Image (cartoon, grey):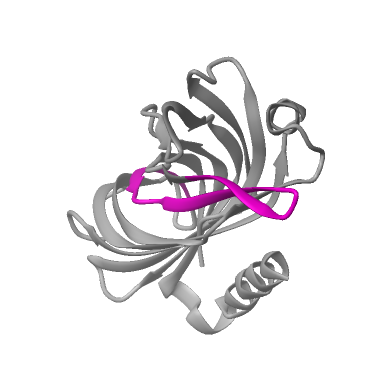
Amino acid sequence: MKTKLSIALLTSLLALSPVANANLSVNVGAINVNPDNDSSKINEAPALGLRADDDTQLGITIDYALDDNWVLELVAATPFSHDVQGAGGLAGNKIAKIKHLPPTFLAQYHFFDATYKFRPFVGVGVNYTVFFDEEPSAALKATLGTDDVEVKLDDSFGFAAQAGFNYMMSENWGLHGMVSLIDIDTDATVYAGGSKALTSTVEIDPVVAMFGIKYKF
């Protein structure tokens, strides 16, 4: 349901493009989410930890220009998938596989005036990350001694900071690049046989980088 709602929101925004006219642009390209390398401790066993790997998906960002310098941007993407690996005493073991959608809304300031082809920008905003399809690994089930294992991650709300550039090759087409730092923290709970077995506050806090093509309406 959450995935369908996110897709519906993105579709609705794209449908508004004829109304927004020249104020609207769309950027499409590869977007990578690279979580913080520091491991998050398991509360019941601090010597054990969790760490998520990176993933690259199709990124879609929608820009709405308020004037020549101020722009509102919505960052969206196809769902990211991460393997959660063990750290500390669990190093070398896959713990779970998770998916998430991290839509981010930012206000950007674009330097120089609109006549410049190359325009760097900075931005700040908020992120809401939805986790779903959490799948426990065979190794985790073996460790807990049961196949009845469930992994749940709470949704996350946090701040985001961004820097990037646009380079217009023509009136409508250009290149878009950006790097964002996003605060994504989630409470992870592992259930075994219906009972709470393990808990951890997982600090993902990724660096998000995108490079793609820009189309200005």
Please state the horizontal and vertical placement of residue 202, each as a whole percent of the image: 44, 43
Is residue 210 left or right of 30 when viewed as pictured?
left
Please state the horizontal and vertical placement of residue 191, each as a whole percent of the image: 66, 49
97 shown above or below 75: above
**Quarter occupied by the N terminus:** bottom right
Q: Residue furthest top?
A: 92
Task: Specify whether residue 141 is in view.
Answer: yes
Q: Residue furthest left?
A: 112
Between 125 and 158, the one nearer to me in the picture: 158
Between 191 and 214, the one nearer to me in the picture: 191
Determine the residue positioned at 40% across, 51% down: 185
Q: Is residue 203 magenta?
A: no
Q: Residue furthest right?
A: 147
Please state the horizontal and vertical placement of residue 6, each as a whole percent of the image: 63, 68
Please state the horizontal and vertical placement of residue 15, each as a whole percent of the image: 64, 78
213 shown above or below 50: below
First to last magenta residue range: 174-199
39 shown above or below 134: above
Determine the residue positioned at 52% across, 49% down: 188
Q: Residue furthest bottom?
A: 19
Determine the residue positioned at 75% across, 49% down: 193
Q: What secondary structure is the magenta-colored segment mainly?
A: strand
Determine the residue positioned at 48% across, 22% down: 87
Between 82 and 51, the one nearer to me in the picture: 51
